[in-house]
Amino acid sequence: MALEEYKGVFVFAQQVDNVLDGVAFELLGKGKDLAKDLDTDVTAVLIGSGIKGLADQLAEYGADRVIVVDDPELKDYRTEPYAHALASVINEYKPEIMLVGATAIGRDLGPTVSARVKTGLTADCTVLEIGDFPLVAVPGKEADQKHKQLLMTRPAFGGNTIATIACPDNRPQMATVRPGVMQKIAPIAGAKANIVEFNPGFTPNNRYVEILNIVKAVKNTANIMDAKILVSGGRGVGSKENFKLLEDLAEVLGGTVSCSRAVVENGWLPVDLQVGQTGKTVRPQIYFAIGISGAIQHVAGMEDSDLIVAINKDEDAPIFDVADYGLVGDLNKIVPALTAALKAEMQAK
Amino acid sequence: MDFGLDKKHEMARSLFRDFAENEVKPLAQEVDETEEFPMETVKKMQKLGFMGIPVPKEYGGQGCDPLTYVMCVEELSKVCATTGVVVSAHTSLCIDPIMTYGTEDQKQKYVKALATGEKLGAFALTEPGAGTDAQGAQTKAVLDGDEWVLNGSKCFITNGKVADVYIVIAITSVTEDKRGRKKKNFSAFIVDKGAPGFSFGTKEKKMGIRGSSTYELIFEDCRIPKENLLGPLGKGFPIAMHTLDGGRIGIAAQALGIAEGALDRAIAYTKERKQFGRSIAQQQNTQFKLADMATRVEAAQMLVYKAAMAKATQKVYSVEAAKAKLFAAETAMAVTTEVVQLFGGYGYIREYDVERMMRDAKITEIYEGTSEVQRMVISGALLR
Amino acid sequence: MNIVVCIKQVPDTKGGVKFNPDGTLDRAAMLAIMNPDDKAGLEAALRIKDATGAKVTVLTMGLPKADAVLREAMAMGADEAVLVTDRVLGGADTWATSTTIAGALRNLDYDLIITGRQAIDGDTAQVGPQIAEHLSLPVISYAEDIKVEGDSVIVKRQYEDRYHEVKAKMPCLITALSELNEPRYMTPGGIFDACDKEVTVWGRADLKDVDDSDLGLKGSPTKIAKASDKVPKGAGEKVNLDPAESVEYLIGKFKEKHII
């Protein structure tokens, strides 16, 4: 593999039903940063059927070039024709970096393509940067240190560890990137990209699966043990009606409302939403403890949450001992303000 | 001492523990509160073969040893003593005597159905006038043509009414010894639920193991087939005693489980509970209590496992069983009482399990031979 | 019908994570369990076995102690077990791992290969699709339901906002989600039998059609530059500000953490 033949940062521009996924724009934003460090440009790879029209949008979000693979076989996502499309683009255009969103599509397409083009793939990255590998040169072997490598940082072990990974001897350096992590640029209206059409030819074989049916999902009622974000309220919320404040916050974050035992006892919420020793044990990514004092019986059920935010008017409430971020104050003022601020942030994205 | 705790037993324990944690523990409080027999759990255990652990595979069992069975009762009882005793009474008191004394036909007919969990078993010896002194029993069986006719009643029967198969001990003759004293001769019978003249009396309301189904059995001209005599005619008393030796190992395992469960709770609680600015586990009073309890629990475990090993390798294991039950039961009572004390006010509240464990522990000092009976068995062997 | 389920012994991540000095994982220091997605895949295979009498073989690559998950799988009902273990296979990334497993699978008869979607230690979800690629098989990832129909499988393939009902001809490879089912328990008798059974052990020499240069740490295109435990939770920060400032503070923290 002649590594120096591989040039440019490529981004898989995921679309479903001819609508670009937000992660495509985020990858373009990151791709631009990386391209700047490498003194190269950013190419979006757009794969689908009848999708040429999306190319301009990619240009507005930073693509210098868009390679369009447009074929009727590519109408709905299937591993094989998509892998063939992307692998063919890689073999033809030889990028040094190939970024894919860590979505249910990208986490299937990425590994298949990396195995096909025989390169490494780092999954679910949260940080991408250009640097040296090894990070520090081995004394006496300074010449072996490689420069301008893609350093890919990712959490592993359920978030217990962080690893930084390089792919020094193979190209392209491939990564899937978690949606929502990278920043997209403010779109540049009217920006145009160099559009290249490419079709490697698609001949169905045994690896083409047949899609019998596509069913768009309806969300089930929440199970607090599966929730990624829990907005939990305690006695301090004051009333059943006041839980509306928490519901609003949960809605903005795509989270679920849960509660402490006192809330169940007061009949404000049903018992299946109760967190704690006599309720459920939860481990969400973010746990908001709002108006919850933090009795050990409650803490036992939520202390393993990745991030705990506590809001309580009692400065000495034990919940602050386990919280990553504690806000001392009136929840009736803080929660609606937080909801509004988050809503504004989301819309800005 | 080598208990043969190999890979098999380690895996079996992890299975029982997972099952207990996931399927049994969440229901324990409700079972106690509602006093309802945990039929759904029993059905799950039937499916997994928990109802025939020490039974050979050719009779529908799992082909494991008594130690594996004991571990099952132990792990279940850690989280719910009611569930533990259901398995114990079924296995030790119903399957075991049929396996030991039954004819091939009886084993085929009854053990298979019991071990696969298709049917649930119970054992009936105790009567209102005959607890520790079994000679006080009144229930009689008389042969009439091809059928035995039973009359009388039995009380405090575990798995009563929910069981399908009952081992019933009844008087089949009265003889006089040389000095002219009357002696009742007992025989053992297998009675199916639904036998004509077999009915159930009142359900007992109990202090502990409240979900276990404890009933009075009533026999009014109850007719069962002649071939349902279990073991030789007139040998009912030794059969019952030998059965209870096995049963005591099961109850010892139940007691051990209760003690272990309470100790586990105490360790977790004392680490979390803060008083005077530090966790109560940091106080020496707590530390010493925990140390004493842990030592005692492990000693109980040794005696219980030793009895299980004896059952696997010896014909007679009365003393091993008696020592195991005596010590494990008294350990369960002492440990649960201490743990309630460590929990303080919370220990006295129903939500916190440990008061239930204390109530559950008490019965292990009473049923299948009181602690006093165990002392009689042990001292009897010493002074023989 | 022959089903091979690829399973992995993984550290129970609840207990914290340890590394060797070279940055690779010190698996020996952590409690080991069968990876949850793999267990769901095994359950799916066992249900097909219950319905059709298929033979289920479990295969794992790992240290000799990975024998434990194979025994567990047999105690649940798998018929045979293969352990692929060899010093030269150590330190493998997903490329080298999938190459190794594909090399082992070439020795086995299979109509269906099931892997878990991802392991809780690496969370990559890469090995399943990469095995399929090495063996030129159709792959269906993220399965929430699997049905066998004649010489095909019909799979509910999960996406974020929908599912596809997908049909593939066997042989093929499916990656299973833990949502697929509720795995059965072992049985006591199953445990006793499983401990008495033989586990087939394969080393490097038993792998078919693989190059040494594609195996182990050497054969791994990705290299660890740095690995560390996540900084443990401190006492946390507590602020006592007016509501607007509090919100501003929290939003700032969320941005720092890439939460928003």
Image (spheres, coloured by chain):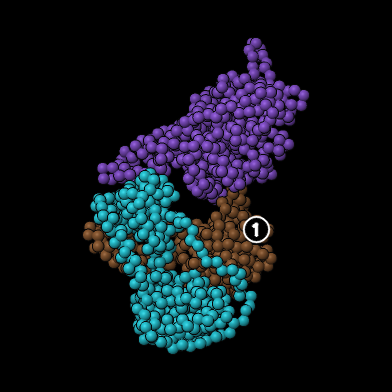
Chain colours: A cyan, B purple, C brown
Residue A338 picture location, percent across and down: 30, 62
Residue C25 at least partly seen: yes
Read off the chain for label 1. C
Name the residue: 73% across, 23% down. B143
| Image quarter of residue A250 | bottom left
Judged from the image, the secondary structure of the residue bearing numbered disc 1 is helix
| As drawn, B71 above or below B320 | below
Q: Residue at x 58, y 23 (%)?
A: B127
Between A171 and B3, which is closer to the camera in this rendering? A171
Q: Which amino acid lies under the numbered mark 1 shown in the image of this protein? A: Lys
* Image quadrant containing the C terminus of chain B: top right
Q: Nearer the viewer, residue A41 or B132?
A: A41
Disc 1 target residue: C49
Foreground pick, C105 / A285: A285
Q: Is residue C138 left or right of residue B32?
A: right
- Which residue of the protein is positioned furthest toward the left in this rendering? C241
In the picture, measured across the screen, residue B242 lies left or right of residue A52, that is right
